[in-house]
Amino acid sequence: MMRDLHPSVGFADGVIRVVKDYEGHADLGGRGLVLVPCAFAWPDVIVLTARPNVPTVSYAPRGVGRLWARRPTPAAAALAEVLGRTRAALLAQLDLPMSTTQAAAQLALSAPSVNAHLQALRAAGLLAARRDGRRVLYSRTELGDRLLAGR
């Protein structure tokens, strides 16, 4: 269950690890752990361990990125015919900056596969990339926005 919860969350040897931009350690001391799916946590994970609160991990439930999505338009179907379904879906998914790992989790694909698609879309000028600490965030360019809109 923990493996599929979020790309930043892992569980091994009785220890839950959450990859964040800072380091910390919390011994829950038998207080338990509450897992809270939260649309507003997307695309990150929110961790609360300070007493007197109950230790909590809030994460984005699978598919939350599509919560407000519109139905595919004829232009989107035509775009999938030209780019391929995976690249068209990836282009549509990147309305907010996202790392390779986050995009892979959202599309239920492997990170290396998504990375290859991201590089191809970036080389075509449809995506831009910027470094944020140890990760690279991808987002659509103006050209990508226009192509997605069918203009």
Image: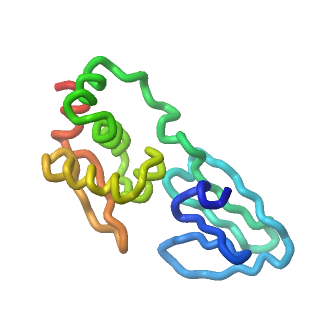
Whether residue 100 is situated above or below residue 13 in the rendered picture: above
Number of callouts = 0
- The quarter of the picture where residue 86 lies is top left
Residue at x-position 85% and y-position 71%: 31
- The quarter of the picture where residue 9 lies is bottom right
- The quarter of the picture where residue 29 lies is bottom right
Q: Position of residue 22 (x, y in %)?
A: 51, 78
Q: Position of residue 101 (x, y in %)?
A: 42, 59
Q: How is the image coloured?
A: rainbow
Residue at x-position 48% and y-position 35%: 66
Residue at x-position 25% and y-position 32%: 148
Looking at the image, residue 74 sits to the left or right of residue 51; the answer is left
Whether residue 28 is situated above or below residue 95 in the rendered picture: below
Q: Position of residue 140 (x, y in %)?
A: 26, 45
Q: Nearer the viewer, residue 102 or 26?
A: 102
Q: Position of residue 59 (x, y in %)?
A: 61, 54
Looking at the image, residue 64 sits to the left or right of residue 122; the answer is right
Looking at the image, residue 25 sits to the left or right of residue 72; the answer is right
Residue furthest top in the image: 74
In the picture, the quarter occupied by the N terminus is bottom right
